[in-house]
Amino acid sequence: MAEIDISGDDDDPDVNVSASGSRLPSFLGTRLVILAIVVGVLYLVRPLIHGIVYATLYTPSGLVLFGGTAVTALVLWFLPPWRLERDEKRRSMVSVLFEDDESPAGDVLASSGSAMRKLRIFGGIVTVLFVLSVLVGIPAGALEQRTLAQQTMADATELDEFPQANANNPRVVPREVSDVTTRGSVSYRTHRLGASDIARQEDGSLAWSYPIEPDGARNKLLENQRGVLVANMTSMDEQQITVYEADFTHGEGMWLHRSARWNVKLGGYLSKYNDEAVEFSHDGQPYLYYPKTGHEWHLLPLPHTTPKWNGGALVHPDGTIEHLTPEQAQENEILDGQRLYPMTLTRSEMGSLGYREGIINQLPVVGAHEGQIEVAALPEGANNEQPFVIDLEGERMSYVTAMEPYGEDTRGLDEVWLADAETGEYTFFGTDEETLTGPERAMGIARNEDSQTGWGDNFVVTEPVPVTVDGDLWWHIKVAPTDYTDVTRNVFVNADANNAIELSDDTAIREFIRGDIDEDELTAGENGTDVQPAPDGEDVLYYVLITNDNGEVVDRIPVKAGQDTQIVAPGDERATDNETAN
C-alpha cells in the first residue's frame, strides 16, 4: 500500500492519501467498457445528437461549452473515487483510495461521497465553461457576420436594371389559398399533406408541393410517405393538382430511422440540414432534395466560422440517397431547374450585410451606421418571408431580398438582392439616391385602390412578392377572402411611381408582366385614369376609369381582349401608341 502524507497547520489540515493499486486496473477497465457501450449507443442514434456534435465542431462557443464539458466528464469519469476521513487528534484529512482492508459497505460510502463531490466539481466547471462560451461567442459572432458580409459583397455583381420576370410563371396563388384549397380537394385516412414548398413542375411551371406523409403516431412509426402532390401556383382561374404516388423507404413524416432526414444525416454528418425538403417529380417519379449547409473555420483575427453551401442530398423513393457536391447537384439531370441553394444560407448572407461597413459602424450608440442596410420588414398579414422565390426569364428561379436603410422609421427600399437558386450567385440593384417603395407601403396602396372592400372583415391583401417588368420593380400582391378559399384578384404596385393596377384574369397578368400592357398610360397620376378589374365581364379584362381633379369617377370604359386602347391626355393633341389588350 502506498501512502502520501502532507502536513500543514490548522487552516491547511494534514492530508493522508492511502491508495492501493490492486483494484485500479479493474476500476479503469470497468469504466472503459461502460464508456464504450455509451459511445456505441450514441453512434447508433447519432442523428439525435447531430446538432450538438456539429456545434462543437463548427462554432467557437460550442467548442468551448460542449467540448469542454465532454473533456471534463471524461476526466472525472476515469478519476478513481476517494473516501474522506478526519483524524481529530492529528487534525488531518485522510483520503483513502481502494483500501483492501475496508468493508464493502465502506467502499459504497466512499463511492457515494466521491460521486457527489465529482458532481459538484462538474457543475462548477460547466458553469465556468458556459460563461466562457458567451464571452467567446460574442466577438466570434460579430466576426462571422463581418467575414460573411465581405464574402457576399466580393462575389456579387451590381446590375444596371432589374432582370425580367418570367411572365409564364407568376406567383398568382398564395400559400394560404393553396393550402386551404388543396387540402380540401384530397382525402386520406392514414396520411396527410405536409408543409408546402415551391418546386418546378415537369412542364416548367412553378407549383406548391406537398409530401403525402403518414398521419398519427402509429402511422408515423409503421407507414411510409406515399409520394408528392403539386398544386400549380401560376393560375387563379383553375387549380391544377397532380399526385405522384410512390412509397418512400425513407420519407417525410416518418419517425426515427425510417425518416429521410435521419438517413441523410447518416451519410452527410458534417453538414447541416436547415432547409425543408424540396418535393418534386422527374419523369413521373417523386423525389426529395435536402440542401446542405457547411461551415469553414477562420483563425484570424480571432477563431470564427462562416457558413457555406455543401451541396445537397437527393432521396429516391427506393431509399437510395445521393450526396452531391454543388457542382454535381447542378449537373444532375433529375434536379434540373429545381431550387438547389439553401434558402436559409441566403437568409444568413443577407442578414450579414449590415456588417459590410465594419463591426463598429453598426453598433448602437457608437456606430455611425453609414451605408448600413437591413432586410426589409414585412407587415403583419404579409404571410410570407424573405427571401422571396420568383422565376426570371429563361426559367431561372431566384431568391429575392429587399433591403431597406438602417433605421426604425425607414421603410423604403435601398437595394434589391437576387440569388440564383441553382448556383447561389448574387446580383444586386442599388437605388442610389432614389428610394423605392417597400412591401408595407405597397400593401397599403393596394388597399387604398379599393375603398369599397371590407378589408380585414371580408378580404385581405397578402403575400407581397417582388416582380420585375421592363426594368422596373413591382410588388405583386394578392387579394383573398379571410378564409383563403380563393384569389379574387392580383394587384401590382410600382415600387418607384407608386402606381397600382388590379387584374383578375390570368391572361392579363401574364400580359402585364410581359410588358404588353403599358400601365403608365392607365394611371391617375399620368392621364387622369385608373384601372379597375372586371371579374363579372365575360370578355372584359379591366375598366379604364376616367377621374376629375377631385378623384371622382366621371367615366368607366371597358377594355376587352384584343381591343386597341388609346389614351390622350387633356390638352394634348398627340396620341399615345396603340395598346392591345390580350
Image (cartoon, helix red, strand yellow):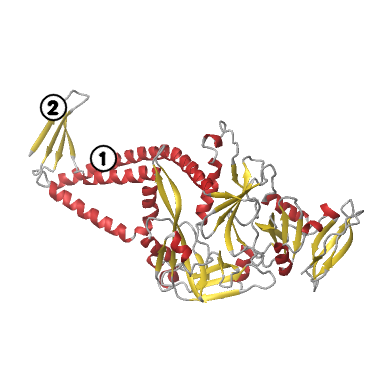
Q: Is residue 79 above or below residue 567?
A: above
Between tags 2 and 1, which lies in front? Answer: 1
Q: How many neighbours does mark 2 have within 10 angstroms: few (below 14), some (14-19), or many (20 or more)?
A: few
Quadrant of the image containing the C terminus: bottom right
Which mark sits nearer the N-terminus, 2 or 1?
Answer: 2
The picture quadrant where one finds residue 356 is: top right
Residue 245: image x %, image y %? 50, 76
> Observer-nearest residue: 114 or 339?
339
Q: How many neighbours does mark 1 have within 10 angstroms: few (below 14), some (14-19), or many (20 or more)?
A: some
> Observer-nearest residue: 296 or 183?
296
State if disc 1 and disc 2 touch (CB < 8 Å): no
Residue 188 can be seen, yes or no: no
Residue 90, which numbered label?
2
The picture quadrant where one finds residue 552 is: bottom right
Residue 434: image x %, image y %? 70, 44
Residue that carries the numbered disc 1 in the rendered image: 117
Q: Amino acid at mark 2?
A: Arg
Residue 444, which numbered label?
none
Identify the secondary structure beneath mark 2.
loop
Residue 281: image x %, image y %? 51, 72
Residue 433: image x %, image y %? 69, 42
